[in-house]
Amino acid sequence: MECTVSWTGATGARSGMGFLAETGSGHTLMMDGAPDAAKPENGGQNLAPRPMETVLAGTGGCTAYDVVLILKRGRHDVRGCSVKLSSERAETDPKVFTKIHMHFTVTGKGIPAAAVERAIAMSHDKYCSASIMLGKTAEIMTSFDLVEL
């Protein structure tokens, strides 16, 4: 897996803390920092997600992917899956994630709650590299709602 991240302020007329990530799979992702009123030259322009927001979003994507795949492989009629992540970070540098709560909403027909619970557990215990890495510094909690169609 490869990714090249380039500072966009290095080539533009205006400075800032914007970055363009180009992934090995051929996709791009913009990231930016928060504006800094005290030192505008050190802040971003709030034009894109913060880098740590993309880490959190990537973790959500990783675990939701697992949950859907595990449910589909179990031949469950899954129609939708979303995960809302909320987090806390350390107050001092490095401001690692210290707590992450993931609330899943799984929609489908006839899916047993135990299957959803098992899929979430399997993702967090075995398959989701992102949440397993973040679990080294953060307490990760999960919950879910199951919506019957």
Image (spheres, helix red, strand yellow):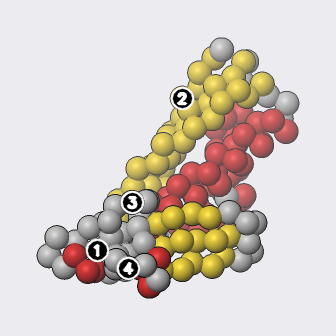
Extreme residue in the bottom direction: 10
**Numbered tag placed on residue 145 in the rendering:** 2
- Where 60 sits versus 7, above or below? above
Residue 63 percent across, percent down from the top left: 64, 51
Q: Are the residues tagged 2 and 3 within 8 Å (C-beta)?
A: no
- Depth check: 18 or 145 in front? 18
Q: Which residue is mark 4?
A: 13
> In front: mark 4 or mark 3?
4
Residue 19 as seen in the image, left or right of residue 75? left
Q: Which residue is mark 3?
A: 47
Q: Amino acid at mark 2?
A: Asp
Give the structural element (helix, strand or loop) at label 1. loop
**Numbered tag placed on residue 144 in the rendering:** none
Residue 103 percent across, percent down from the top left: 50, 40
- Depth check: 145 or 113 in front? 145
* Snapshot quadrant of residue 112: top right
Q: Residue at x 64, y 25 (%)?
A: 107
Q: Residue at x 38, y 75 (%)?
A: 17
